[in-house]
Amino acid sequence: MTVFSLRNKSGNGIETILRRGPTRLERREWLEGYLFIAPWWLGFIIFTAGPFLAAIYLSMTKYDLVTSPRFIGAANYMQMLQDPLIFHSLQITAVYAVAGVILRFIVGLFLAILVNQKVPIVNFFRTAYELPTVITGVAVALMWQRVFHAEFGMVNNFLKLLGIQGPAWFGHPDWVVPTFILLNFWEAGRTMVIYLAGLQTIPNELYEAATVDGAGNFRKFQHITLPLLTPVIFFQIVLGIISSFQVFALAYIITQGGPANSSLFYVLYIYRQGFQYLDMGYASAMAEVLFLIILGITLVLWLTSGRWVFYMGEIRK
Amino acid sequence: MATLPIRISPHKLFGYYIPLYLVLLFFAALLLFPFIWLMSRSIMPYKDIFAVPTIWFPKTITFVHFQNMFSLPQWPFGRYFMNTLLVTLGVIAGRVFSASLVAFGFSRIRFPGRDALFLLVLSTMMIPFQVVMIPTYILFNKLGWLNTLLPLIVPSFFGGGAFYIFLFRQFIMTIPAELDDAARIDGCSRLGIYWNVIFPLMGPATVTVVVFSFLETWNDFLHPLIFLTRAGTQTLALALQQFVQVQFMQAEMVFVVATVAMIPPLIIFFAGQRYFVEGMIMSGLKG
């Protein structure tokens, strides 16, 4: 109790706290606090911390759900090093995540600048760009499967009008990952909303001052818009890569990892090992590696953020 | 509200307005056309859907596929729809009450370790579900909850997730603390303050949480996929995928069922667009 009191932010000196201790009223408030947040910490223990620790243990076992887990040490991790599909799935997932995030960044920022123009009915277009981001999951996956179908898909039918024989998209090992990357275009509305909010926080005086100094639109973009948006861009890239690394439903529904494992994204491979081969230990080891990768990406981006992220507050300081 | 400028110089008209609207239109068409293509196929007669050369827009309109959808053998659409609705409503109820209660605790009550615990709340956003998926599956298996809707609903009653706690907390911090003090002087307990003072004022935050939870839960695939494996227990999204995969639903039915699955999220989007956008900005701008 006194240990906690030392951290008390109320500004009391250590001695006074030690002498006085918490009053009955304070203790009552503490208790109420812990009770109010009880749903969270119960949930944290049952659905996050517990399973998280259990996954670490399972990753060192052989477990098929039927017989009890057998401890095998680091064998699953050693096996991962020998498994060519691990490297393959990590590689395509990384390519997908980075390319997808870049595509969403470019298109999203461009759309945000478009709908930030002060012209009539621009809000209609804004809504139109947000619409595709609302629908995700199975319905949209089945839609893409048909839109990019090799024979009677929308895209290839359109290309036929132009006299172009379209590729097989999801059906061709070389095209399948680029096609998944392309789908990020339809999610750009999500990043657009965020960049638009960022654009609207940029004070107009900066642009006016730049106009007085004779800067053209491109220089204004380069020297005002882009630097002031870096905190938002930074955060979007971190979140985007983390979420893209977890790509699952689209690939599971559209290709099941095919053709010939060419779209076997990492989480799809975890699912396959765990729920199709019932190798829960190996799948848990893979999940731990996913966690370390996400942790690593986040840490690296945070540590390097000082070099290229510019915060508005720095002007005032 | 922007109004048309009274005089537009030809230079500005051709150098700005016309190119701008062309680009705006181009992107709108590109982004929306796949959806229009899919939905228009749900009201086309079978022979038109796969006609060569392709028919872009419906020439004759039919709703026969929609009628057929309710009478597909071994595909009880009504039950899947009800399952999905039940899960969605359950998750919304769990989130709205537990996340707001926890957020109230984190923003209105002082207790040791509060800030550190809140940091822990936020850091759980770093742990993707896939990392804890297998032990969670084993847990629900031991509880005998597989093939029931419980694994999808019950966890949302335990805080409802870090993002939603954060969202409510941000909102509560904008409500003046004097309101709490006034209520306390009138003899209101803390639970009373939460329920009678704070909760009624949180309308906008609640709507944002409802809109987000609806879209997230309605579209969810991974959770139902691992927790619901027996026929008849699935949600609409999962049942749709499995029917296409396993039994090969008649090709034209896919367009219809996908269209139907898209309609509720669209309705929610149009009804709560402002809140949807606000929530998205919250999720994207702040840590």
Image (cartoon, rainbow, N blue to C red):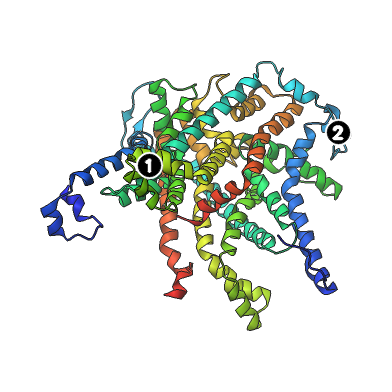
Q: Amino acid at mark 1?
A: Ile
Query: Closer to the camera: disc 2 or disc 1?
Result: 1
Q: Earlier in the sequence, mark 2 or mark 1?
A: 2
Residue B161 % position (x, y): 44, 41
| Closest to the observer, A232 or B168 | B168
Residue B58: image quadrant is top right
Q: Which mark is residue B155?
A: none
Q: Is residue B250 visible?
A: yes
Q: Chain of mark 1?
A: B
- Going by the picture, which residue comes out furthest to the left? A19
Residue B224 % position (x, y): 53, 29
Q: Report the residue marked by disc 2.
A: B51
Q: Is residue A83 left or right of residue A127?
A: left
| Circle 2: element type | loop
Which residue is at 83% across, 31% downward?
Answer: B44
| Closest to the observer, B98 or B43 | B98
Q: Is residue A246 visible?
A: no
Q: Are marks 2 and 1 on the same chain?
A: yes
Marks 2 and 1, how far apart at CA: 64 Å
Which residue is at 40% across, 56% downward?
Answer: A299
Q: Report the residue marked by disc 1.
A: B193
Q: Is residue A72 left or right of residue B262?
A: left
Q: Chain of mark 2?
A: B
Which residue is at 64% across, 83% downward?
Answer: A212
Residue A234 % position (x, y): 50, 60
Residue B85 % position (x, y): 58, 28
| Closest to the observer, A25 or A171 | A25
Q: Is residue A24 above or below residue A274?
A: below
Q: Amino acid at mark 2?
A: Ala
